[in-house]
Image (spheres, grey):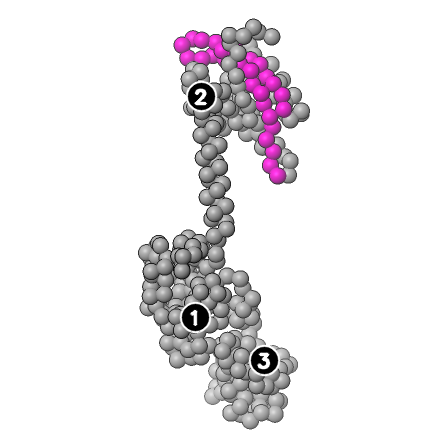
Amino acid sequence: MGNRATKRGGTDPGSSRADFRAGRPDTVARILDALKGNPAGLNIVEIAERTGLNRMSAAKYLDVLMAQEWVAAEVSGRSKVYTLPKRLPVTAFLKHATKCYCITDNDLRVVQYHDNLLSVSGLTPAEIDGIPLPDIFGERIDNFGDCLDACKKSIAGGSDTVVADDRFRGILKVMEIHHLPVRFPDGSPGLIAVSQEITDRRLAEIEMNRKAERFQRIIEHLLHVVVETGTDGTVTYVNPRAAEWGLLPKSLIGRPFAAIAVPDDRERVLTGLEHVQRARQGTVRFRAHATGGRVLRLEADCRVTSDPSGACKGMVCLLRDVTGQKSR
């Protein structure tokens, strides 16, 4: 994690851990092995005896291990009893996390962060450590007001997610930021912001929406009627062209496709749809009542729609008005 010093007077576990490992990793291993062999815990004197350290050195190592969450301590009488924690230390997996983590105090000053934040934000530690979030991101995130509201909500104990447009040095990054409440050992509130870049996903969504809108415009301006059904044959969509034919879309949606036909032709429609489902496509011909007492002769070219596994999702039918043509 980042943050070399915090408002609360502690040192960053990541920084201390680096110094620690550069010194005597074998000593750390001896301490952890001693605690592993004594699940009930050891006091400082017992740890010093089992590791060959003096009490002062053992205490320094234990302080750093506790900051890293590799060792836990409880007061028993006049002394502390040290044990291996039952929970996985956060630092054990945060260093491998692909998302960015940023922890602030209740004044929104950054007190701790994941190193990924540096590469994603393009900032240096000096531009992040101890700096309030508004001073860091206020000018570069288009909708920072939404982020600020989410931060305040988290400080108050709630949670919120914001999709933010981060513009830095002419480059746009779309970030999904989850804001969650935290509480420090002294009881004061704070928040953790967990963010990931979703630029590619957002651009793909925008392109998909554009294609969907384009397709919708094409469907709505076709000269034919388009009907979509579910797996049970119930009509789920009818394009606006149907109203011009005297078939009111709102009166068709939610009804069986066969109900479009006049009563005498419905059995034929049902038989035709069964063939379509078996063959995956086919044509069904029938008559339908329209407004004004008219009877239309319709020809429906139907195709089965499938999900990625190949299972039937329903049908899409293209209806043509063949009333003026010679019946077949």
State the quadrant of the C terminus: top right
Mark 1 near mark 3, Cβ–Cβ under 8 Å? Answer: no
- In the picture provided, is 25 more to the left or to the right than 174? right
In percent of the image, x 40 and y 70: which residue is there? 128
For label 1, the residue is 124
For label 2, the residue is 241
Question: Nearer the N terminus, badge 2 or badge 1?
Answer: 1
* Residue type at the position of mark 2: Arg
Query: Looking at the picture, does residue 193 appear above or below residue 296?
Result: below
- In the picture provided, is 97 more to the left or to the right than 291? right
* Residue type at the position of mark 3: Ala
Query: Looking at the picture, does residue 281 appear above or below residue 263?
Result: below
Query: Residue 282: image x %, image y %?
Result: 62, 21
Which residue ends up furthest to the front in the rendered image? 170
Magenta residues, dominant SS class: strand
Badge 1: how crowded within 10 Å, few (<14), some, or many (20+)? Answer: few
* Residue type at the position of mark 1: Thr
In percent of the image, x 61 and y 89: which residue is there? 51
Question: Nearer the N terminus, badge 3 or badge 2?
Answer: 3
Query: Residue 311: image x %, image y %?
Result: 63, 35
Q: Nearer the viewer, residue 213 or 307?
A: 213
For the magenta stretch, what is the residue range? Answer: 281-308
In percent of the image, x 47 and y 47: which residue is there? 203
For label 3, the residue is 40
Is disc 1 placed on a helix, strand or loop? loop
Nearer the camera: disc 3 or disc 2? 2
Question: Nearer the N terminus, badge 1 or badge 3?
Answer: 3
Query: Looking at the picture, does residue 19 appear above or below residue 114?
Result: below
